[in-house]
Image (spheres, rainbow, N blue to C red):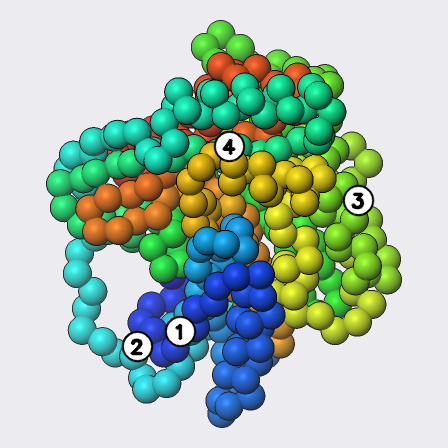
Amino acid sequence: MSWVRAGQGLVGWGEAARFEAHGPDRFAEVDRWWRDYVAGVDVHNELGVPGTGPTAFVSMAFADEPGHSVLIVPEVVIGQRDGVSWVTEIGRSAVTRPLAKPVRRPKRVHYTEGELTVDGYRDAVRAAVTRMKAGELGKVVLAHDVLATTDGPIDVRFLLRELAARYPNCWAYAVDGLIGATPELLLRRTGQVVSSRVLAGTTWPRPGVSDDDLAAALLGSRKDQDEHAYAVASLADTLRPFCATMTVDEQPSVLRLHNVLHLSSEVGGILDRETSLLRLSEAVHPTAAVGGTPRQLAIPLIRELEGMDRGRYAGPIGWIDGNGDGEMGVALRCAKVDGSTARLFAGCGIVADSDPDTEVREAAAKLVPMREALEGADRS
Ligand SMILES: C=C(O[C@@H]1C=C(C(=O)O)C=C[C@H]1O)C(=O)O
């Protein structure tokens, strides 16, 4: 298990406990189970900072149905933040296990279409544009999948190492077979303080165009600004009821990654009452960065047009501690790994002005991180 950005974060292994939940009450059920678990453990904690003491990794299903959500309490958690490092052991001592096996790199990777083919995706985007031009809704985020098969079992540690090296600005995560490097922070809670990094509006590198020109074009694009504004408003509107004060960036900035550039806004708040990160995540998920606007129309439309189960892709993923603090990212730029296969996902926000072929290319750019990680491509 992992949640690491720029060398800081948490890594865990072993399984001291696990809880799974389904359906619309999944956040409340995981929250309740975690509170009961924490109440039942005898804690020796010399640091008392977030991410120490009882700590669990969490990965929530995108949709109420289908899909399953999971919380795992590792036997060992290694943490590092602001020059402080720690080890947490849960249950019997597991640090002194026999040495782990060497990290294995896949020798051969073969790609095939997923449940929603690229042509099917283009058709879905076209259908969504028609619905939005008719004024049914403002934005919907549609995704498709790609299957990768390798010559032997995929070593999650190899993928994490590759992702962390190429995307130091993203959170390299792994929870129960869902691996990725997300640039998007749904919510961080540290005591009363909450923050979020909302992304929506994307471009990608092309030969002969400088990153500065790309960034300027993105900032100047009405369509991307509109997509972005929907996402920021959805996060801010659902978080506001929990906050005494809130700040929202007036203008987005540009987040530059090596495969894509995004419009990015920071939202911050001070909670007006004790609310766990899980319950806050329940309120804000799915933002219009991965769902749409209005949410109650976008979610059924996603199901209708994608016709596939997203599973935990685009759901909240991260860690929580015994005080209800933690960090939840949006599970993007990821793959669900199962033995020697990986199911990669990527999606794009669709508005009335979207062009289906351009959205297909944007989704392809968002698949790059996992493809590079699987292939162990040259990092220079
Ligand atoms: C849906 C994805 O990404 C989201 C959609 C974006 C967009 O449409 O511009 C940008 C960032 C993410 O919020 C994905 O990566 O699969």
Residue type pointed to by label 2:
Val
- Residue that sits furthest to the right in the current view: 244
What residue is rendered at 36% in x and 27% in y? 117
Front tag of 4 and 1: 4
- What residue is shown with label 1? 18
Q: Is residue 147 above or below residue 12?
A: above
Quarter of the figure that contains the N terminus: bottom left
**Label annotation for residue 305:** 4
Q: Position of residue 188 (x, y in %)?
A: 64, 58
Mark with earlier residue (2, 3) = 2
The residue tagged with tag 3: helix, strand or loop? strand
What residue is rendered at 63% in x and 52% in y? 285
Q: CA distance from mark 4 to mark 3?
A: 32 Å
- What residue is shown with label 2? 95
Mark with earlier residue (3, 1) = 1
Position of residue 167 in the picture relative to residue 14 (left or right): right
- Residue that sits furthest to the top in the current view: 208
Quarter of the figure that contains the C terminus: top left
